[in-house]
């Protein structure tokens, strides 16, 4: 027989009683229970029976769900997440302390969570306002006060560093290209030579293994043993092998880059170290000169490039956005990757395309539509509020898999350039570049977009006063004062 679970509801009963300004004696009378019984319930010294639970719901109004443990667990999870936010609290509070806070001071916890939500909104509002007035902040051109108040997170700092380099790192790119040539790497057969190179140069043994976890690469420097996840394609294996090779062979160059960038935070340093080693690996898979020549030859057809170099669509798009070597530049692209909720997880640009730093991307941007037509390449001519027009393509990609129960990730990737460069792309052959018939008026995101007549606007722009007229209504959700 299954043992029934004991239900303790003391904190919730006490809170509801105090809200109504009842004494314990008054509550006991309404419940037809003894005073000692009610006291034991409120102090969690006695669980409640189903009959008492129903009586509590009747006395306080509402239903039994208000006494559900699920509600407490949600509150506990929210409290734990809030106190792990390093902008709020840098210390650590154990699970037992969190549980006591939730049980004995639920009103204070609710008040704290309400304040934390307001804190998040104010942080976002501040960031949006700064973004609107200062654009993509450059540490060399904005005031020290603004930089301190809007200190970026590690991943933002790393992303901004790469963007300041125009997404091209010459030293690592040339070294990766040299490695691809000297090791005679060819698409579909890169992993074997790289494994031999690691063994020959560093005594590293490479093995394949899978234990059900989501890791891709593990390196044990003491045993000189590198484990890569079983089931990876040759290109995926080569990427992981080249990443480790960069850390072992070119660690000094990577460390110099980190020192020159003056990253003070240890987490940021490690994140940029990973980013630099990944850059090397990507450049080795797609050597600069060969890849640029192939891209021009097929007019930047990403599927043909994928087939020729036997890599993923995302890898091709990412590499296209880095082809900015002096005297041998490709089309300057922006590259973006986002999930179905509109969260941008990758963004880099060799163009002036303005990505929103905070909040979601513009809903009129065709990258969102890609999820409704998976596997298809969609095109769009779009105009930003500054009048610059862009030509872009978008497509869904899927990562993971390998079995029915294997975890999968679905993204959409977008690749675009200023409209003047679109003639070089096969995807724009059907468009009159000089006089396009269909131009989507997009923006960097609702919080910073100045467009007054957008029917898709989700929020008014930060720092703007909303104009409200109850006698007027239109498809435009928010109207705001002009500058």
Image (cartoon, grey):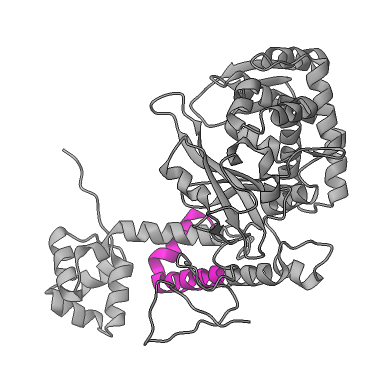
Residue in the foreground of this view, choosing between 253 and 415 = 415
Image-based side of 129 in relation to 139, left or right? left
- In reply to whether residue 113 is colored magenta, the answer given is yes
Q: Is residue 430 above or below residue 223?
A: below
- On the picture, is 222 further left or further right than 382? right
Image quadrant assignment for residue 264: bottom right
Q: Magenta part of the protein: which range?
A: 93-121
Residue 281 part of the magenta segment: no
Q: Position of residue 167 (x, y in %)?
A: 76, 44
Point 47% across, 51% down: residue: 341
Residue 351 appears left or right of 361? right
> Residue 184: x percent and y percent?
78, 13
Residue situated in front as seen by the camera: 370 or 244: 370
Quarter of the image for the N terminus: give it. top left
Look at the image and tell me whether residue 227 can be seen: no
Q: Examine the rendered structure and indicate whether residue 358 appears above or below residue 19.
A: above
Percent across and percent down for residue 89 are: 61, 64
How many marks the image carries: the answer is: 0
Instruction: Please give left or right for residue 355 compared with residue 4 in the image.
Output: right
Q: Residue at 21% of width from left, 61% of height from top?
A: 48
Where's the C terminus, which quadrant? Answer: bottom right
16 and 447: which one is in front? 447
Looking at the image, which residue is at 73% across and 13% down?
Answer: 193
Secondary structure character of the magenta stretch overall = helix
Q: At which x and y percent is residue 185? A: 74, 16
Q: Give the residue displayed 57% in from the left and 57% down from the top.
A: 84
Taking 172 as reference, is 452 above or below it? below
Residue 275 seen anywhere in this rendered image of the structure: yes
């Amino acid at each position: 027989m299954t043992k029934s679970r004991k239900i303790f509801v003391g904190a919730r009963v006490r809170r509801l009683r105090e809200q109504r300004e009842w004494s314990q004696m008054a509550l006991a009378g309404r419940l037809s229970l003894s005073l000692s019984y009610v006291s034991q319930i409120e102090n969690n010294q006695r669980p409640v029976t189903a009959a008492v639970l129903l009586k509590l719901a009747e006395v306080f109004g509402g239903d039994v769900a208000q006494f559900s443990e699920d509600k407490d667990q949600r509150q506990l999870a929210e409290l734990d997440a809030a106190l792990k936010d390093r902008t709020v609290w840098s210390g650590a509070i154990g699970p037992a302390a969190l549980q006591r806070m939730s049980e004995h001071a639920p009103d204070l916890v609710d008040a704290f969570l309400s304040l934390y939500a307001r804190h998040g909104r104010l942080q976002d509002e501040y960031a949006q306002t700064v973004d609107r007035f200062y654009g993509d902040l450059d540490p060399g051109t904005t005031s020290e006060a603004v930089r301190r108040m809007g200190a970026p997170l590690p991943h933002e700092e790393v992303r901004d560093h790469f963007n300041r380099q125009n997404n091209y790192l010459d030293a690592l790119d040339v070294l990766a290209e040299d490695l691809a040539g000297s090791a005679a790497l060819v698409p579909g057969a890169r992993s074997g030579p790289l494994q031999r190179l690691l063994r020959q140069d560093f005594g590293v043994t490479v093995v394949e293994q899978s234990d059900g976890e989501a890791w891709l690469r593990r390196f044990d420097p003491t045993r000189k043993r590198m484990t890569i996840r079983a089931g990876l394609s040759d290109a995926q294996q080569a990427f992981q092998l080249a990443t480790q090779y960069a850390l072992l062979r070119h660690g000094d160059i990577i460390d110099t880059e980190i020192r020159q960038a003056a990253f003070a935070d240890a987490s940021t340093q490690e994140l940029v170290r990973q980013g630099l080693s990944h850059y090397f690996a990507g450049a080795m898979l797609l050597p600069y000169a060969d890849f640029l020549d192939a891209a021009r030859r097929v007019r930047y057809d990403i599927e043909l490039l994928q087939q020729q170099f036997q890599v993923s669509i995302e890898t091709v798009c990412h590499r296209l956005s880095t082809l900015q070597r002096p005297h041998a530049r490709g089309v300057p692209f922006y590259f973006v990757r986002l999930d179905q909720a509109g969260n941008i997880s990758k963004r880099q640009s060799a163009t002036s395309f303005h990505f929103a730093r905070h909040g979601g991307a513009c809903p009129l941007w065709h990258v969102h539509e890609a999820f409704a037509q998976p596997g298809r390449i969609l095109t769009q001519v779009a105009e930003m509020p500054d009048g610059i027009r862009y030509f872009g393509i978008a497509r869904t990609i899927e990562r993971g898999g390998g079995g029915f129960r294997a975890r999968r990730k679905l993204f959409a990737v977008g690749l675009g350039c200023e409209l003047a460069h679109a003639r070089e792309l096969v995807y724009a052959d059907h468009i009159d570049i000089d006089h396009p018939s269909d131009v989507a008026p997009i923006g960097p995101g609702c919080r910073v977009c100045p467009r007054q007549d957008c029917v898709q606007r989700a929020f008014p722009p930060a720092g703007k006063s909303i104009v409200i007229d109850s006698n007027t209504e239109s498809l435009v959700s928010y109207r705001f004062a002009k500058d």
